[in-house]
Image (cartoon, rainbow, N blue to C red):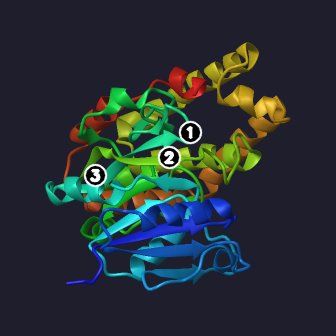
Amino acid sequence: MPEKLVTVAIPTLAADSKLAECVRSLAGQTRQDFEIVIIDNSGAKLARKTVSPGENLRFIENDSNVGFGAAINQAWSSSQSPFVAALNDDAVAAPRWIEELLAVMESNPGAGMCASQVRLMGREQLDSAGMLIAGDGSSKQRGHLEPPDRYGRQEEVLAPSGSAALYRRTMLDQIGGFDEDFFLYCEDTDLGLRACWAGWKCLYAPGAVVEHHYSYTAGRATPLKAYYVERNRLFLLVKNFPLGNLIASPFVSMARYFWHVAGIFKGRGAAARFREDGNSGLQMAAFVVRAHWALVQNWSRLWRKRRAIRAKARVTPAVFGELLRTHAISVREVARL
């Protein structure tokens, strides 16, 4: 039996005061049978200047930014805990966060993942209560900007936001952890969908509260974010969607692009924020083209991954398609958020 029940993996790039605040919140947890692994992607060992190592805290220091998923994989592969928690370095966990996640997972052996109630820092609004997915592979946080009390019930959701999630080691061992090719964004949804194919469930724990400085590290609507979100939703789509949904997805994407353009003219939504931050519509179109070119370049590899997922599948495409419908979000809503 491993000494620690949970390994809390915290990837960091900035390694600044937000990281220190995050670690302090873990010191006050009602359950203390966990270790903290800080994965320092700064390439300059900045985390050690912010947080002191301790008996239950260790560092993994990378020479460069290996990405979010690869960082979590490093913590998972270097530990033996039955559960691995992912936590953003700009998140602050409430005292019962780990206790509430474990209570749900330990009473539901078929659950491979658990989603937290992630609130926007200092606001009575949610960041995430799990994930939703659109017909073109775009994923968004369930309950984003809504009051937390609307999401006060434990229930099954599609996948957790990687900003604050708990994963069962047995599940990670079975499906292979995060896909490191994603580098940044959508890797949590991809992992969740692969877990669903393998027959695992995700439950939402409303008592596992975390406050999150939304997009603190990567920016609100940066070119970096725009490219990786578009590229990775294509990667996710090819790997995970049943064939009928995959064939229909380009038409769904066209509808989403329409609503993004409409949002620019109305001054609302992700595309409008991208413009407000000094970027042009031409840049936005260029990122879409670049993302599709990356899809072409990686098609063979993605298709091999798709076949590997299907080889281990424990649900039928019909059952998986029903999951997508149950946890769906419209592309109009995707463009609005």
Q: Quadrant of residue 175?
A: bottom left
Q: Amino acid at mark 3?
A: Trp
Residue contact between numbered discs 2 and 1, judged by CB atoms under 8 Å:
yes
In the displayed structure, would residue 330 be above or below residue 52? above
Question: At numbered mark 1, what does the secondary structure look like: helix, strand or loop?
Answer: loop
Camera-side residue of 139 and 164: 164
Comparing 217 with 77, the one in front is 217
Q: Nearer the viewer, mark 2 or mark 1?
A: 1
Whether pointer 3 and pointer 1 mark residues with C-beta atoms closer than 8 Å, the reply is no
Quadrant of the image containing the C terminus: top right
* Residue sticking out furthest to the top: 266
Q: CA distance from mark 2 to mark 1?
A: 8 Å
Lateral position of residue 67 relative to residue 117, left or right: right
Category of crowding for the residue at label 1, using alpha-carbon neighbours closer than 10 angstroms: few (below 14), some (14–19), many (at least 20): few
Which is in the foreground here, disc 3 or disc 1? 1
In this picture, residue 95 sits left or right of residue 43: left
At a point 13% along the width and 55% down the height, the residue shown is: 107
User: What is the CA distance from the residue labelled 3 to the residue labelled 2?
Assistant: 30 Å
The percent position of residue 21, horizontal first and vertical second, equals 57, 61
* Residue with the mark numbered 2: 211
| Residue placed most toward the observer, 88 or 111 | 88
Residue 198 in view here = no
In the image, which disc is placed on residue 197?
A: 3
Mark 3 surroundings: few (<14), some (14-19) or many (≥20) residues within 10 A: many
What residue is shown with label 1?
122
User: Measured from the top left, where is residue 306 in percent x and y?
Assistant: 39, 56
Identify the element where label 2 is drawn: strand
Q: Quadrant of the N terminus?
A: bottom left
Displayed quadrant of residue 312: bottom left
